[in-house]
Amino acid sequence: VPGFHHRFPDWLDALGDADPRRVDLSAETITIPAAAGDLIIWRQDLPHGASPNASDRPRMAHYVNMYAPTLTSHPVWR
């Protein structure tokens, strides 16, 4: 969902008691075309997901996270 990080705080405030993990954002998604061996880099705070693997071979992924040295984690999310 492009640009979601710009409106995330307001979106979260407007949810009320709704579970943010159950809100359907599919109407706002775009597909990122990629071929075998492509590297895709995205912001972790953007809603994202993987499409079904249409190949007869397994999908391989390697995840790398980068954090600012000043990052502090929320105790509830550990």
Image (spheres, rainbow, N blue to C red):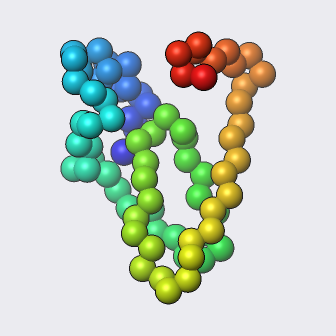
The x and y percentages for residue 59 are 56, 71
Q: Is residue 2 visible?
A: no
Q: Is residue 71 visible?
A: yes
Q: Which quarter of the picture shows residue 51?
A: bottom left
Q: Nearer the viewer, residue 77 or 13?
A: 77
Quadrant in which the C terminus appears: top right
Task: Give the tally of numbered discs.
Answer: 0
Q: Which quarter of the picture shows residue 12?
A: top left
- Which residue shows up at 33% across the image and 35% down it? 21
* On screen, residue 55 above or below 66: below
Name the side, left or right, on which 74 lies relative to 2: right
The x and y percentages for residue 47 are 41, 42
* On screen, residue 71 above or below 50: above
Residue that sits furthest to the bottom in the current view: 56
* On screen, residue 18 above or below 61: above
- Which residue shows up at 69% across the image and 41% down it? 65
Quadrant in which the N terminus appears: top left
The x and y percentages for residue 31 are 38, 61
The x and y percentages for residue 11 are 29, 24
- Which residue shows up at 68% across the image and 58% down it? 62
* On screen, residue 22 above or below 9: below
